[in-house]
Image (cartoon, rainbow, N blue to C red):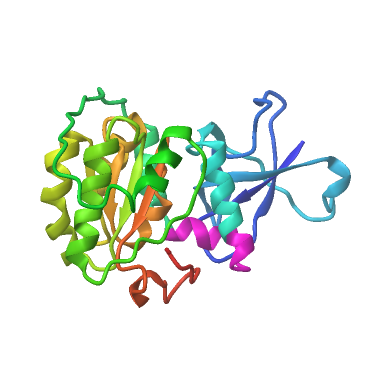
Amino acid sequence: MYVDVVFPNNMPPLTYKLHKEVPYDLIGRLVKAPLRQRDSFGVISCVKNSHDVDKKKEIKKISHIYGHFISDRYFLLLKWLADYYLNHLGNVLKNIPFEEIISTMFNTELEGSGHKEVVGDLIYGKELKPIYDSLRTEKYGTFLFHADSLSKEKEMLKEVFSTMINLIKGAIILVPEIHMIEEITPILKEIVDERLCIYHSRLSKKNKINALNQMLSGQKDIVLGTRSAVLLPLRRLSFIAVLEEQSQSYKAEEGIRYNGR
């Protein structure tokens, strides 16, 4: 049996041989395989039969097979991103915290924590009803909230979380600039308490690993961050808010040039 393995770099998947004793659910699993004179981490993207492989080429063997790289749905999102933007899946892996995710896969899971509910005065009750209905019925919907200032967007955000906190199972709040995180953090912290996780490019590698560990363990399930936060591997996700959605900062200018919006 053979598999294609994708690595976090600008190149197509490479084909490798498998040992005889392998798990049946291979796609999406993290592996170690020889690449440029050393073993590197990659992800299985495809399983091949022997007749699909050019036997004239030297085909190396997988060194180690580990668990799944996050979830099947998350891996499908990454593959969709590569197809949509006509790019290698390896470039997509470069744009997510690949090494940090691997670090969390070999760490001990953390304990979960509770949350509290805070309900304030409702300002936009009627305007936000479609969002509430979508959360209650668990049916997908996209909604445009008209706000002429960031302060109104923050009020909207506060009202949604105050009203629906018990129904929000995983959320991502995107902002275009890092400095905006400081403005919004106190608003969310008051409502969701320890469920809140901050994520952006200026975090140290250690802090990124800690944040991902808390997400993957389920301890923190509400993420406030910049563009790259939309690609984080939350275990569940029921709400995404894009503040200042007209901002050009949501467009990546290097690597796979995706638009976070």
- Depth check: give the residue in front, 184 or 162: 162
Q: Quadrant of the C terminus?
A: bottom left
Q: Residue at x 24, y 60 (%)?
A: 153
Q: Residue at x 52, y 63 (%)?
A: 91
Our reading of the magenta stretch's main secondary structure is helix
Residue 125 sits above or below residue 18 on the image: below
Image coordinates for residue 260, horizontal then vertical, percent: 42, 63
Residue at far right of view: 51
Residue 149 sits above or below residue 237 on the image: below
Instruction: State the image quarter where residue 152 is shown.
Output: bottom left
Image coordinates for residue 133, horizontal then vertical, percent: 42, 40
Q: Is residue 231 visible?
A: yes
Q: From the viewer's perspective, is 248 left or right of 118?
A: right
Asked if the magenta segment contains residue 153, the reply would be no
- Depth check: give the residue in front, 261 or 81: 261
- Depth check: give the residue in front, 86 or 192: 192
Q: From the viewer's perspective, is 61 left or right of 185?
A: right
Residue 94 sits above or below residue 216 on the image: below
Q: Residue at x 34, y 50 (%)?
A: 128
Q: Residue at x 21, y 24 (%)?
A: 114
Where are the magenta residues, as a range?
82-95
Q: From the viewer's perspective, is 77 left or right of 112?
A: right
Image coordinates for residue 22, horizontal then vertical, percent: 66, 26
Total marks drawn? 0
Asked if the magenta segment contains residue 86, the reply would be yes
Q: Quadrant of the N terminus?
A: top right
Q: Is residue 237 visible?
A: no
Image coordinates for residue 231, horizontal then vertical, percent: 42, 53
